[in-house]
Amino acid sequence: MEHRTKGRKFSRTASHKKAMMSNLSVSLILHDRIKTTLAKAKELRLYVEPLVTKAKKANGSSEKGVHLRRVAKQFLKDDSAVKRLFDEIGPRYADRPGGYTRVLKTGHRYGDGADTAIIEFVDYDHAKKKEATDDDKSAKKKGKKGETAVEPKAKKTKSKKEDTKETKTKSEEKKPKKKASKKKEDE
């Protein structure tokens, strides 16, 4: 029985666990939502929530702001994640007293049966992300001047079904001929 131990071990060394949590934190901050195992998602909350609180406090005063950015940079090791954390995510949760993330269970992973989960920020907007991806798809279809892109001509190739039909008909034609020839030989 291990008393007075905080957190999960994940069968890793302390430095490996710290690096893993740092990488997961960066991914969550940059993408607002990630899919991982349930245990990692629950453990990640313990690292991300204090970072968001630091970002909130840094917004209030410029004196603490520099120090808190350096503390966050020391853990995250990614400039773009630190910038997004302090410029976008911190102000977004200025009025919220805590509980910035939610963990949604998503079932079991096919390969090893591990419980999977999605961890996301509480105000993650599914409809907004869907519209953004739809806009990206429509923008790719349009050309440079806003005209629809010309689709390349499709080559006329036979599908596998057509090929199998043709081979079946040829093989079926041959089989009766062979049977007929055998009957003639028997007579």
Image (cartoon, rainbow, N blue to C red):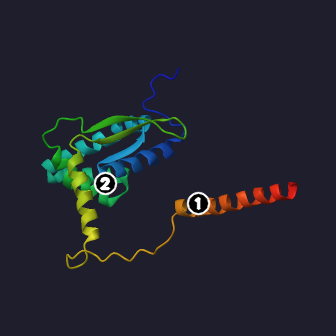
Q: Amino acid at mark 1?
A: Thr
Residue name at image x 28 percent, y 39 percent: 101
Q: Secondary structure at mark 1?
A: helix
* Residue 181 screen position, x and y as percent: 80, 60
Within-10-Å neighbours for mark 1: few <14, some 14–19, many 20+:
few
In this view, 102 is above or below 67 = above
Label placed on residue 115: none
- Badge 2: how crowded within 10 Å, few (<14), some, or many (20+)? some
**From this viewpoint, is residue 86 visible?**
no
Which residue is at a point 30% across and 60% down the rendered structure image? 80
Relative horizontal placement of residue 50, taking residue 62 as reference (left or right): right
Q: Which mark is residue 30?
A: 2
Instruction: Examine the image and state in which quarter residue 171 appears.
Output: bottom right
Q: Residue at x 45, y 47 (%)?
A: 20
Q: Is residue 3 visible?
A: yes
- Closer to viewer: mark 2 or mark 1: 1
**Nearer to me, 39 or 5:** 39
Q: Which residue is the site of mark 1?
A: 164
Observer-nearest residue: 142 or 38? 142
Q: Residue at point 43% right, 32% down?
A: 7
Amino acid on which the number 2 mark rests in the picture: Leu
Pointer 2 or 1: first along the chain? 2
Horizontal relation, residue 183 to residue 64: left or right:
right
* Image quarter of the C terminus: bottom right
Residue 124, position in %: x, y? 23, 45
